[in-house]
Image: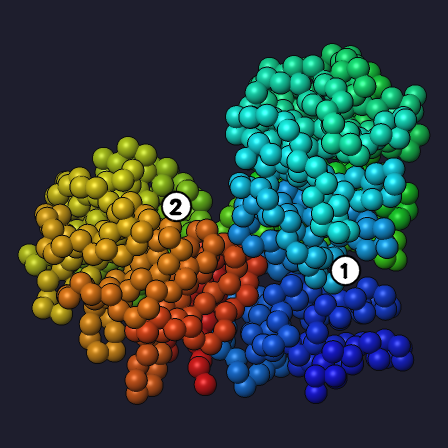
């Protein structure tokens, strides 16, 4: 069986019978993902929708766990509206009832752990095409763009995030990468051996190195060009062979340089193009003497700060620089004169943070741009005509995009996303495709999920994303309504409560607004806003039923907690210090508010007065950033908390004692919930998610890992355990919304 799993695709390709009947939904979870990717790169194209979806989960597939592979593929099939029943494994844990999740046409090749800041591509001496990524974790990693496999060990040495990487080929054929970090260090590595060649002495820089580029001079020397984040310094040039500083490749800038690119002009000069956000100008410099060519193009009034930069020479035209702005526009600059050329290219909604250029197989020159709106767009050069509008990750911004050519003359865009994913887009197919529309959550995804049961008995799900509140049918997953959230934007939390008069009301808050918006779900109308005294916004929200029958809204924002009467808007108690919060009813019937603090403690407070009702619980060694309340099978009420110490802890709210072992949290934007499984023992599980895109299960009582993780794409920002038609389910919020049942053997 292992031999078949590893080599069946190779033999089928050799025999010319590799097709969708072999690469079926039943077989793919068992396949060796790296080997199959390598085979598919050399074989005749297999046009199959299931295989295309598998390419989006193959980076997370593990040889030793085909059940987890099956669950990841099943989730993707359900998101695409295809039958997931064919993907079955006796060890499967995650079973989707419905999935409302976007499906892209890209291939996810790899994921840099902890998040990605920078990316470049290179071709190693033996022809291997790789992506080089710089991460939040301070490491530099190399990935095979065909198989997705890591190449060598991570390159370590930086003590902070790696903000910039750039590759180059030296005169002796060695392929190197230059890495710049927030720690102000610049390092040069041999990509074939992983050897550190140089640690360049660039001096102390405020906020470190922002951008790096490489350039080849007419005499064959290859230079590293270093730009600082904030200082009004020239771009400095270093010889990559000797490690010696050579010259200043530019003059001084009004502020820090936000982007660099270098190229050779037809007259043999090597020029550097720089962007500076302070005066919204792009400048062209002669690298060897540091003199400016022409004047900075006057983009003031037509554009915002400049952040993206790439260079190319279109057919029958002058060499140009492609410049992206924070107002979403893209501009062309003639590198021979330093003047702007053509009209602005309009198509992005937010900052264009990265750009590159490519030549398609039909000879067309194109620019590829991406940014904070999640869109990857392609433009014809030099006409500036938009060729496509593809939406990439809906849960994180595109940090870097680069183009390269893979085997078979396939020209691709390689996108590095903030969530750590490395994604491949086929540029030839984008040039002939239509705009991809997704009426989903986009722009960093769902951040809040709540449920309610209406007086009619219908169970609904409410989701919050930016300024949009949506209501979904919990049973079918059908969209019921888009609520006009009004002035509330950047939604951070939603909760629901049944008021004493029987109305079911949704409470919606924003991290950017000090008001809480109230919506009557029974009559489907707004019932006003509750204005709090939080200076910045309301980040956490819960309700509590007080002993006198009143419903109280407990809010947290700017480090303080308050209690409000939602009917009158009056402040009932507070403010007191605190952060994440939840409310509960103890076994003796007393209501309690549990509030997480920056010092890692959990404070138990009376929700009517915010007076302490017990000693603080020592839960974490760093700030608490997520909190849930749950009931164990033996009746104990517990607080489940996640902290910036990367741990999940469980505490009995009656005794104050910890329950079970410490559980590791995973990645930024940590989310958690609990769910009780059916059966005689009624096991309570803790469900955790985060920036690494996996959802994990833990036994709440013991802290032991349960089952296997579910691999998704992007951040998992919201989790909620509930019941669907009497069956425990987990609602998963991220790029979309999903309802999953958990089954353990």
Quadrant (top left/top right/bottom left/bottom right) for the C terminus:
bottom left
Of the pair 89 and 249, the residue shown nearer to us: 249
Q: In this orientation, does residue 555 appear?
A: yes
Residue 463: name its quadrant. bottom left
Residue 183 vs residue 19: left or right? left
Q: Residue at x 78, y 81 (%)?
A: 8
| Label 1 Cα crowd, 10 Å radius (few <14 / some 14-19 / many 20+) | many
Q: Is residue 10 above or below residue 281?
A: below
Residue 62: name its quadrant. bottom right
Q: Residue at x 78, y 79 (%)?
A: 7
Q: Which of marks 1 and 2 is nearer the N terminus?
A: 1
Q: Residue at x 30, y 87 (%)?
A: 680
Residue 277 vs residue 549: left or right? right
Q: In this orientation, does residue 48 appear?
A: no
| Label 2 Cα crowd, 10 Å radius (few <14 / some 14-19 / many 20+) | many
The percent coordinates of residue 673 (x first, y second) are 36, 64
The percent coordinates of residue 67 (x first, y second) are 57, 78
Contact (Cβ within 8 Å) of mark 1 with mark 2: no
Colour scheme shown: rainbow
Of the pair 272 and 495, the residue shown nearer to us: 272
Of the pair 621 and 681, the residue shown nearer to us: 621
Residue 560: name its quadrant. top left
Residue 675 vs residue 303: left or right? left
Q: Residue at x 85, y 51 (%)?
A: 125
Quadrant (top left/top right/bottom left/bottom right) for the N terminus:
bottom right
Secondary structure at badge 1 equals loop
Which residue in the structure is indicated by mark 2?
491
The percent coordinates of residue 142 (x first, y second) are 69, 52
Marks 1 and 2 sit apart, C-alpha to C-alpha, by: 39 Å
Which residue in the structure is indicated by mark 1?
146
Q: Which of marks 1 and 2 is in front?
A: 1
């Amino acid at each position: 069986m292992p031999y078949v799993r590893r080599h069946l695709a190779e033999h089928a390709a050799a025999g010319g019978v590799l097709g969708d009947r072999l690469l079926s939904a039943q077989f793919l979870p068992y396949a060796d993902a790296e080997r199959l990717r390598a085979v598919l790169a050399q074989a005749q194209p297999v046009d199959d929708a299931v295989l295309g979806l598998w390419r989006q989960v193959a980076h997370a597939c593990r040889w030793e766990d085909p059940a987890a592979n099956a669950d990841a593929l099943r989730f993707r099939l359900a998101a695409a509206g295809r039958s997931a029943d064919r993907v079955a494994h006796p060890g499967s844990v995650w079973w989707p009832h419905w999935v409302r999740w976007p499906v892209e046409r890209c291939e996810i090749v790899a994921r840099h752990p902890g998040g990605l800041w920078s990316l470049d591509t290179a071709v190693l001496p033996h022809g291997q095409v790789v992506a080089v990524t710089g991460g939040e974790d301070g490491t530099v990693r190399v990935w095979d763009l065909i198989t997705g496999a890591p190449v060598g060990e991570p390159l370590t040495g930086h003590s902070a995030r790696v903000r910039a990487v750039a590759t180059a080929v030296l005169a002796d054929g060695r392929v190197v990468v230059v890495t710049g970090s927030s720690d102000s260090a610049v390092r040069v590595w041999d990509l074939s051996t992983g050897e550190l060649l140089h640690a360049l002495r660039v001096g102390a820089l405020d906020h470190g190195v922002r951008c790096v580029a490489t350039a080849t001079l007419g005499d064959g020397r290859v230079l590293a060009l270093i730009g600082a984040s904030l200082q009004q310094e020239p771009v400095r040039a270093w010889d990559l062979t000797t490690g010696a500083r050579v010259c200043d490749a530019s003059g001084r800038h009004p502020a820090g340089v936000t982007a660099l690119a270098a190229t050779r002009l037809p007259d043999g000069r090597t020029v550097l193009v720089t962007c500076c956000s302070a005066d919204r100008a792009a400048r062209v410099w002669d690298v060897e003497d540091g003199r400016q060519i022409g004047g900075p193009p006057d983009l003031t009034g037509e554009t915002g700060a400049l952040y993206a930069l790439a260079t190319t020479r279109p057919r029958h035209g002058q060499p140009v620089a492609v410049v992206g702005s924070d107002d979403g526009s893209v501009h062309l600059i003639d590198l021979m004169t330093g003047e702007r050329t053509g009209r602005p290219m309009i198509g992005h909604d937010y900052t264009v943070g990265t750009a590159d250029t490519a030549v398609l197989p039909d000879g067309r020159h194109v620019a590829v741009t991406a940014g904070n709106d999640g869109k990857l767009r392609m433009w014809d050069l030099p006409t500036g005509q938009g060729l496509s509008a593809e939406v990439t990750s809906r849960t994180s911004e595109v940090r870097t995009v680069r183009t390269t050519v893979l085997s078979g003359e396939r020209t691709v865009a390689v996108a590095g996303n903030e969530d750590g994913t490395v994604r491949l887009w086929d540029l030839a197919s984008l040039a002939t495709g239509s705009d991809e529309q997704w009426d989903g959550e986009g722009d960093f995804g769902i951040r809040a999920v709540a449920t309610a049961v209406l007086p009619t008995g219908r169970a609904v799900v409410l989701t919050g994303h930016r300024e949009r509140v949506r209501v979904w049918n919990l049973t079918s997953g059908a969209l019921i309504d888009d609520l006009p959230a009004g002035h509330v934007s950047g939604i951070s939390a939603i909760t629901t409560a049944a008021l004493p008069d029987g109305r079911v009301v949704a409470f919606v808050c924003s991290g950017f607004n000090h008001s809480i918006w109230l919506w009557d779900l029974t009559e489907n109308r707004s019932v006003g806003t509750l204005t709090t005294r939080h200076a910045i916004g309301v980040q956490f929200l819960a309700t509590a039923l007080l002993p006198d029958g009143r419903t109280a809204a407990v809010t947290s924002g700017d480090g303080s907690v308050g209690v409000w009467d939602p009917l009158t808007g009056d402040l009932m108690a507070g403010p007191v210090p605190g952060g994440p919060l939840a409310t509960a009813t103890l076994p003796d019937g007393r209501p309690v508010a549990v509030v997480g603090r920056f010092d890692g403690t959990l404070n138990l407070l009376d929700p009517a007065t915010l007076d302490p009702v017990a000693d603080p619980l020592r839960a974490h060694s760093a700030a608490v950033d997520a909190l849930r309340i749950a009931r164990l099978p033996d009746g104990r009420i517990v607080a489940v908390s996640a902290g910036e110490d990367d741990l999940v802890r469980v505490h009995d709210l009656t005794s104050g004692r910890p329950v079970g072992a410490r559980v590791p949290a995973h990645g930024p934007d940590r989310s958690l919930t609990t769910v009780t499984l059916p059966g005689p023992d009624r096991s309570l599980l803790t469900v955790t998610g985060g920036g690494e895109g996996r959802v994990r299960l833990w036994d709440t009582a013991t802290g032991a890992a349960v089952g296997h993780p579910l691999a998704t794409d992007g951040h998992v920002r919201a989790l909620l355990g509930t019941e669907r038609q009497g069956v425990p389910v987990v609602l998963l919020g991220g790029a979309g919304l999903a309802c999953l049942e958990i089954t353990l053997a």
